[in-house]
Amino acid sequence: MNILIQALLLIAVLLLLMILFFVNKYYIKTRSLMRYYENQGINNSYYFPLVGKYKRMLDSIKEHGDCMHYYKQLLTNQPDCKYTVTNLAHNVCIYFYDLELLNQLYKCSDLVKHQFGVEIFKQVMAGLVFNEGEEHSRKRKILSQAFHYQLLQNMIPQLSQIYEEFFEKIRNKRVSDCIMMGQEIVAESIVRLFFSNSFQGLKFKGKTMTEAVSGIIERVGSMAKSASYALFGKICFSFGQMASVKKDLKQIKEIYKEIITNRINSTNLEELQHKKQKDLIDYLIESKGISKIESEESITIDQIIEEFVTFQVAGLDSSGHTLGMVLYYLCIFPECKQKLVEEIEQTIKTPDDLNTESIKKMKYLGAFVNEVLRYYSVADQIFPRTCNKDIQIGDLIIKKGTQVNVGIIENHYNPKYFKDPHQFNPMRWLDGSLDKLNSYAFNPFSSGKHNCIGQHFAQLEIKVGIIKFLQEFDLELDQDYKFILKFSFLTEPLNPIPITFKSKKQ
């Protein structure tokens, strides 16, 4: 009996110690640091156990059908707000909105990507977006040699072909989830950006290479969103699902490596110079930016594979969601759709007219895409960054270990920069009111040295998509569709977007 009592007492003590540990870590220390910033003048402070600002987002869904409603209204209701502070688990994060402070933040060299959330993706990929310091600068310089005007021009026929292939699947049919369709299109476009048709016909476990990589990304994303990861962190990587993901991805990368190695070994540089349709691998071979041995001027085959997988992750979510939302906005704003149709008919009279020069001339198309990027703001913030020492931004002294971030969507809805920000109005980009707009006020692809290297390609694939869809189809959204915006990794519709694509060619 005494042994049982002692065991129960021991369990009680251990439970008490565990409770005290969690209370200290997730409340006392967190609230203490938040009060430190409140005392420096951050008036907008929000704490909620574990989930922080995401509780506010959940409340916004229930009350307004939009997870970002509070943040879209923030700078209307508090026009002088420069920053806010909140928590996520035990971490304290400051969000900046003031443009001068954002300028200082982007130039600060004492920040590194916060590991929570990022570390799970780094288990399976090591592309540019996850690199820091000199390694980031070196890789970006090499990859930038390939991301130039001619590559984008060469991609237009490929993009047209991809859209036409998908059109055969959806002609006169109802697509129940247009964002998922957008992700499939974007995934295939990234494959061809890097490798043209090198993977045509290849299968992995019965799936195309695009489907296989997309499936792995979904599995990793599910792990990153799991409750077990939120509570126990990277210890979850030791369990079976991550091992299975790594095994599959290793086999896929070996297939990629064999194909790229064969491409390098079989490429005649003189013939390559005269090749008309080049992909990113061609340009890297031509500029000696890819080799079997890493150097200051080149990256290895393994590293280019990492870049490809990373591009898939970034593109599937951001561009895939944006393409799906573009189709939704074309349905609910018919006056915008009609203006686009008229501009397309005036500019693109033959297939050969679809090129970078003609797309540049289509001013309303550019304005429409900008307004989608502002109004939807698929990424409401950048990757959180952590101070690796005490720093000062403006008058604010920020302690080592604090997270900092950029309030992108708050400024996209800031009436100081955008008149009637809650109205979808592409004409705001053409009436001269935004000619001197500060780049930090409209920031869909981030800014500074960590901005999105693929942003011009992302915009091109969206613009080509709009042209092709409106040339080919009349779009009809289900009449009873209810749009509610939730938050996953990105902002996205709670209910899949269902659209019927009626062919214009009977």
Image (spheres, grey):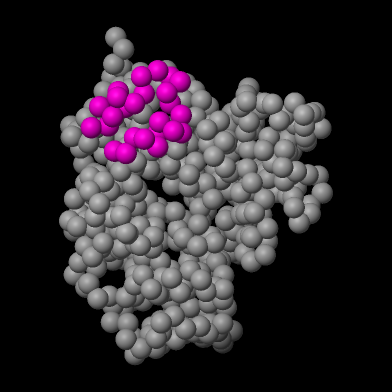
Residue 45 at x, y = what percent? 31, 78
Q: Residue visible at 21% across and 62% down?
A: 415
Q: Residue visible at 30% across and 55% down?
A: 435
Q: Is residue 141 left or right of residue 354?
A: right
Q: Residue visible at 48% across and 47% down?
A: 455
Q: Is residue 392 left or right of residue 115?
A: left
Dominant secondary structure (helix, strand or loop) of the stretch shown in magenta: helix
Q: Nearer the viewer, residue 192 or 357?
A: 357
In the displayed structure, would residue 127 be above or below residue 103?
above
> Can residue 38 be spotted in the picture?
yes
Image quarter of the C terminus = top left
In the displayed structure, would residue 21 be above or below residue 297?
below
- Which region of the structure is painted magenta? 339-364
Q: Nearer the viewer, residue 29 or 414?
A: 414
Residue 143 at x, y = what percent? 64, 48
In the displayed structure, would residue 113 be above or below residue 349?
below
Residue 370 at x, y = what percent? 33, 47
